[in-house]
Amino acid sequence: MDQHLLRVAIGKEPADLVITNGQVVNVCSGEVYPGGVAVAGNRIAAVGDVAYTIGEKTQVIDAGGKYLTPGFIDGHIHPESANLSLGRFAEIVLCHGTTSVFTDLHEIGVVGGIDAMNAALEEARQTPLKYYWVVPSHIPFSPGVETSGGRIDAGIIEQAMARKEAVGLSEVVSPYVAMELPDLMRSLDVTTEQGKVIAGHGPETHGPMWNAFAAAGVTNDHEALSAEEILLRVRSGVHAQLRHNLVVPTLPQMITALTKDGIDSRMVSLVTDDTTAIVLANEGHMDYLVRLALEQGVDWVTAIQMVTLNAAQAFHKDFEIGSLAPGRFADINIVEGPEHFRVLKTVANGKVVAEDLRPAAPLPLAGHAPVLLNTFHLQRPVAASDLVIAARQGARMAHVHVMRTLPWVPITEGGEADLPVRDGYIAADPAQDLLHIAVIERHHRTGNIGRAFLGGMGLKRGAMASSIGHDHHNIVVMGADPGDMALAANRVAEMQGGIVLAENGCIVEEIALPILGLLTDLDAWTLAEKRRSLLAKAAERGCAVSDAFMFLSFITLAAIPAFAITDKGYVDVAKQQIVDPVLSYTP
Amino acid sequence: MDQHLLRVAIGKEPADLVITNGQVVNVCSGEVYPGGVAVAGNRIAAVGDVAYTIGEKTQVIDAGGKYLTPGFIDGHIHPESANLSLGRFAEIVLCHGTTSVFTDLHEIGVVGGIDAMNAALEEARQTPLKYYWVVPSHIPFSPGVETSGGRIDAGIIEQAMARKEAVGLSEVVSPYVAMELPDLMRSLDVTTEQGKVIAGHGPETHGPMWNAFAAAGVTNDHEALSAEEILLRVRSGVHAQLRHNLVVPTLPQMITALTKDGIDSRMVSLVTDDTTAIVLANEGHMDYLVRLALEQGVDWVTAIQMVTLNAAQAFHKDFEIGSLAPGRFADINIVEGPEHFRVLKTVANGKVVAEDLRPAAPLPLAGHAPVLLNTFHLQRPVAASDLVIAARQGARMAHVHVMRTLPWVPITEGGEADLPVRDGYIAADPAQDLLHIAVIERHHRTGNIGRAFLGGMGLKRGAMASSIGHDHHNIVVMGADPGDMALAANRVAEMQGGIVLAENGCIVEEIALPILGLLTDLDAWTLAEKRRSLLAKAAERGCAVSDAFMFLSFITLAAIPAFAITDKGYVDVAKQQIVDPVLSYTP
């Protein structure tokens, strides 16, 4: 028992920090009323009338009549998508009022397995951001058609779930439940026996399939895309994580479940799932989603509940986070009201960590364990000829299958095209908006390289390579010119990860991501600036999508329709099979 | 994983039971809509459109357009107060739609300690009612001034809390938190470390004392008596259990926190705390409280949420009980709507257990472990002279301190009176409405007998004895005539527990409670009838309170103002001291 906390609460010892003169947004009672918050150590000692807790040495912050909310919670996020080390990610989201995230650290596991996740959790513990770990339910995601670095199975999950920081099982896939995959069934049992939470991944799941998904014990899910799908979840007792991000900016169409259908909102929270350094620096994090919800007509207290109490309740963590109440962690935001909502100051674990969207003090960065570094293992640098498809001898033209991405979302559609044969290989044709795309295995020196053709990106010259590719994080490279492709891909490996734009035999711009090939210790603002610059250079070369690297990272995901590419080849997602993109030749 | 459940949900196997043609009261979404519920084994497989789950062998119940609700939950109840064995208690509350209770089995522990609680939990497991065990935080309650049979301390709590059926720590007392009692501090730590729930007992606790109580980790409490105290709890993140029973019939005055103040109701549930067989048989259980709430203007769905989802969430058991949703236990009520609310049919664990407020089939009764029986240990039968206060030699009159109960609630006020000395003892005087009262230790053959004078009961002749006396359950006996008192008390011991009315050397009526001296295997309806008859006989003899045995059980409780009696003597509750009721003599 924290005796200092008890004694501050009862008035025997002075508080360490007191915020006075605020408007308490009480997410438990649904009220807003004048008051303050008293803090003892890392916990809240009193809320409301807190004058009695102030002593000589108490740090007093006058909130100037602004609103006081609990620290915000993102109930489903992969911080790796922002390409920031866990310290740097904490730094930027704390500036925006987020004090807790629920994450599986899945991308870290994809590259480095359980050892890398353990090392990352150690880094996470050194930040003022609470990283609650939801254990990944499987790595790799599509074992037949991709090669990942790490691996997670039921045996590893059983050990991981027994740990205190493990709060549940992540991304349980609806068809896998329906198939009763034995490894998954065992992992579900382990999670339930430990009294922990089963988080689902149930896109396009309805009717009996949905019922089986919920009956398996899934109690939250982030894959709704419509108000109807929000209703389906809540009606089934499945907490609906209402997601909004660059890829699925669907808050406005889903929020009508509350604003029009008027359901009880307690089982709805806002989540980002994925975000980028640019979005974090420009728009923010949960504060951005609150602003969107307010714009859509959600009332003030409900909007705040959806990023605090509701999310905490979904994970049974409401006794420690998600409300301004005695005994809870002292995670407190001072914010502007609903008309001009923004975060003014963030307190995490009883300390002021951010003011005016900037860190209150420089964040000490964790050193990185060896398992998080030097994760690229190629047999040899790739050659241009490794990245293209050799043509049948004597052929002049090839008739090929191609995938084209939609312009606003990295979902591909299949198609066919005729491409010329040049120097013995089937050549991309930027005039038809068709590029070479290849994925180079980089974990186990298998030498695997997958090759295909990609449309919809618009790039006219050069090549772009990246070490971020769901759900295996091999090196993905696309381009008009095979030489530039090899240059870019080899540069990614040389940097031990990163994103690169190359043209005419030169590196145009690059960003190193040396931590697992995914993350950097650059701060979010710097990374955002560098990435904006790199994307601008790509746009100058014709690139037509908002963020080609983000698009590439999903085009490598063998779980999103209709086609994908992995180190094993060109993937027909529905069939979960590797297929040959070459259909026929014209002699 | 329950494969049958998954297969029924997905439509591969037929459901075992399906309720069709209902109006689903969806406590998660706050909606009411037409639909049914499909059951596989003891779990819900589907809700809403369930036609696809019906096979040839499926038992189909047509709800005839009535409402379907989750089984009701009492989040804080001592079933022992109804004097029914756990099987018989389950039987009656299931008839009224209650399928889960949260209980500490504290009274059982008071008599028989942890061994008796373990044996009782074994009996509980054999019923279709879910008994969630909230481990008592201390036995005895007032160690200095009473003798209990069993004992609970932090060491025992640590072992108990590790058990799966233990869901939390019960009745944590606010002043004990403020005093930082080391044993309690350790028990709180044990509970928090196990991720379990701390349930409070915080009457008349406000301001800094309340903040300390909440800061200690208390997350629910049942001791509010006013709407203001409901608000205090919810605003502090403490789930408010809105209690209503014979002793504190306070629902109407508290419910305005919802109906007038309009707070978010998710952190409010209805509880009984204590009830009796008569109330259960006449009025019901949680269904009775729902009816009261509806009468007070609470809306339909909110009223149902307060006896289902809200209570489940308070204990983090919402993933298994409290809603009609796939994967939850198949605890389902078919009920009339809000205008004529009553329970028509109860399904528990997937089986119909009650119809029209009667059991669907006779309940098999558990045998009782030896530790639950033969719990009376007296040095010898008591004599009349043991139960009265010997007067100083030669005195004619005594000036004494007396306690008088209020007529509607067993709260006593102190006073003074002059009583005659007769046959060497200070004699009760029914003309002044003053009786002898005595408590005889019955656990450890200590021979302790406490003696005092009690007013306000109205009894003119004979004596009434009982083995139910909080918080020690020794034999309490009151009467006008010491001979009848001894007869009644000895009869209680002879029966190994019970309640007795005696007059003129005869037993007028009696009810045996042979299980720990607290409980019977009579069914609730029979017990209610017998008790009504016994109370009517007491009323014929002048008894003026509604239920003298219930009153007596609280007048022995050294925690309720202003005075009490235990085996150690007459207790000044505020001082927690034994005091001499004799003030002076007139020679």
Image (cartoon, coloured by chain):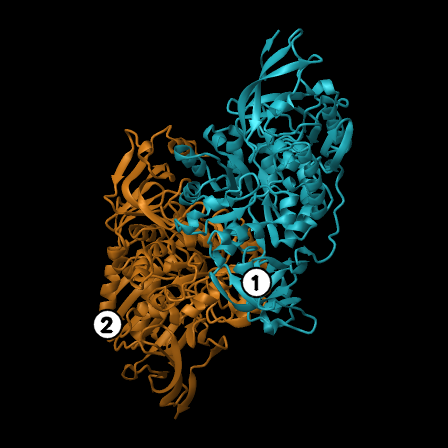
Chain colours: A cyan, B orange
Label 2 residue SS: helix
Determine the residue positioned at 60% across, 21% down: A570
Q: Residue furthest left?
A: B540
Label 2 crowd (10 A; few <14 / some 14-19 / many >=20): some
- Chain at numbered mark 1: A
- Looking at the rendered image, the quarter that the N terminus of chain A falls into is bottom right
Q: Quadrant of residue B231?
A: bottom left
Label 1 sits on a secondary structure element that is strand
Whole-percent x, y for residue B406 in the image: 34, 77
Work out which quarter of the rendered image holds the C terminus of chain A and state it: top right
CA gap, disc 2 and disc 1: 59 Å
Residue at the image position 42 percent from the left and 54 percent from the top: B310
In the image, residue B131 above or below residue A474: below
Determine whether, in the image, residue B452 is placed left or right of residue A492.
left
Q: Nearer the viewer, mark 2 or mark 1?
A: 1
**Where is residue B154 drawn, in percent x and y?**
56, 58
Q: Is residue B17 above or below residue B194?
A: above
Residue A168 appears anywhere in the view: yes
What is the residue that sits farthest to the bottom in this orientation? B587
Reading the image, the residue beneath label 1 is A68
> Picture coordinates of residue A424 (x, y %)?
70, 12
Residue A441, picture quadrant: top right
Q: Nearer the viewer, residue A546 or A361?
A: A546
- Percent x, y for residue A255? 46, 47
Q: Residue at x 67, y 53 (%)?
A: A128
- Nearest the eye: A456 or B104: A456
Q: Which residue is label 2 attached to? A: B539
Task: Count the labels in the image.
Answer: 2
- In terms of image quadrants, where is residue B409? bottom left
Amino acid type, callout 1? Leu
Let me know if marks 2 and 1 both belong to one chain.
Answer: no
